[in-house]
Amino acid sequence: MATSTVENYLKSILRLQRRSGSTAVGEVARELSLTPGTVTTMMRHLSGEGYVDYQPRRGLRLTPDGESAALRVVRRHRLIELFLVQVMAMDWTEVHEEAEQLEHVVSDRLIDRMDEMLGRPTRDPHGDPIPDAEGNIVAMEALPLAEVESGMYRVVRVSDQDPDLLGWLDEKGMTIGEEFELSHCNRAAGVLEIVREEAERLQMGMQVAERVFVESVSA
Ligand SMILES: [Zn+2]
């Protein structure tokens, strides 16, 4: 059984390698706020344990064993978040931190019970897909709002990492599934404007728009 430190490394590598299929010691170090030396030492250890393919100065990636261990942690994290929101009536701004702790300590038995109680859900409160018990996960096609052209969009996911962002979205009443028109996007000034129901206009900065993920809605 992996320690919580190991589990956090595996989770980060899974996230970082999503785009290009591999990552690097420097990227992992930045993500976890550690020195490259510390990460290198851990990569040698994880390589010995069979969790990562690591060769100095080359890319770094999870082995199939590493990937399934990482997906197990992601599954626990997202089911716990959903459980805390749906059953414990907690807010989506406050569940991420709790899940960061609990994901390392709950048993598989408890997680399966939560999964069953929640009706085998496929999305967490922030719209992230929940891997099933076999580690299958739905691929997400969503793009950050900051990167799309004008048009009609639906919110499918928001970053769970920043309580301030989630609090701001709450204040504006924005939830997963909301549809709106991206009417104006001024990348030079770092702001964009969306038109919501009843012609309500809402401006947001690019920093927010980078963490709100959307899919196109055909008219
Ligand atoms: Zn989370």
Image (tube, grey):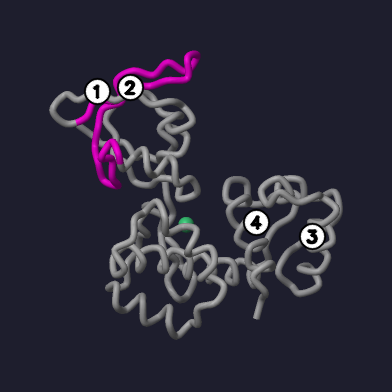
| Mark 1 residue type | Arg
Relative height, residue 17 to residue 217 (above, below): below
Of circles 4 and 1, which is in front? 1
Secondary structure beneath label 3: strand
Between residue 69 and residue 217, name the one nearer to us. Answer: 69
Spatial CA span between label 4 and label 1:
39 Å
Verify whether residue 177 appears in magenta. Answer: yes
Residue at image position (39%, 19%) is: 185
The residue wearing badge 1 is 201
| Horizontal arrangement in the rendering, residue 165 relative to residue 66 (left or right) | left
Q: Do the residues labelled 1 and 2 touch (CB within 8 Å)?
A: yes
The residue wearing badge 4 is 13
Residue at image position (48%, 63%) is: 98
The residue wearing badge 2 is 193
x and y, in percent, of residue 68 in the image: 58, 70
Relative height, residue 215 to residue 140 (above, below): above
The residue wearing badge 3 is 54
Which mark is first along the chain, 3 or 1? 3
| Mark 2 residue type | Glu
Q: Quadrant of the N terminus?
A: bottom right
Q: Residue 36 carries which label?
A: none
